[in-house]
Amino acid sequence: MRIGELSRRAGVSVDAVRFYERQALVEAVSRTPGGFREYGPDAVARIADIKALQALGLALSDIATVLESREPGACRHMDGTLDVVVARLNERIAQLVALRDRAVATQSACTDDACVAERAEAERADAVRARALQVAVARR
């Protein structure tokens, strides 16, 4: 398939496909006599993997390592390289869990009477400030 079809199927721009190719994350399997890039059927899934790994916050160098580890015979050459990627993923997962926990705590707080009271107090304070401003303007 040509680059336009690949970009449509993968949901990325043609420029993104070219960028991934320059970064050696995706490779055209051949070129047509007219010089157009031709990609294999696995390129769509590979770009989906790249996008998923980017969404997790992995750097392109880490994504390249993950993709390289899937190649036949690559395990002999990894020498713990994937350990670093796994550690980064674990760190990201911990950050996401902490973020989720804070959101759940906030959600819980906003459904009880305390949050309602806090909002009412803030509205009263805003009204007092607005009235004080009106008085100050009227004294001028």
Image: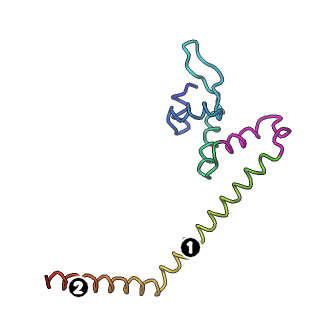
**Residue 42, x across and y down, in percent:** 66, 33
At horizontal 86% and vertical 38% (from top left) the residue drawn is: 76
Mark 2, residue position? 131
> Going by the image, does 67 lie left or right of 129?
right
**SS at badge 2:** helix
Q: Which residues are magenta?
A: 61-79
The front one of 104 and 138 is 138
- Please count the marks in the image: 2
From the viewer's perspective, is the residue at label 1 or at label 2 nearer? 2
Is residue 86 found left or right of 119 in the rendered image?
right
Residue type at tag 1: Val
Q: Amino acid at mark 2?
A: Arg
- Point out residue 107 in the picture as x, y percentages from the top left corner: 51, 75
Give the main secondary structure, helix, strand or loop, of the magenta stretch.
helix
Please identify the quadrant where the C terminus is shown. bottom left
Q: Please state the horizontal and vertical placement of residue 31, each as a whole percent of the image.
A: 60, 18
Q: Is residue 116 magenta?
A: no
> Seen in the image, is 38 located left or right of residue 86?
left
Pointers 1 and 2 in contact (C-beta within 8 Å): no
Which residue is pictured at 17% across the width and 81% down the height?
137
Q: Residues within 10 Å of mark 1 (few under 14, many from 20)?
A: few
Question: Residue 104 shows which numbered tag?
Answer: 1
For residue 74, above or below residue 126? above
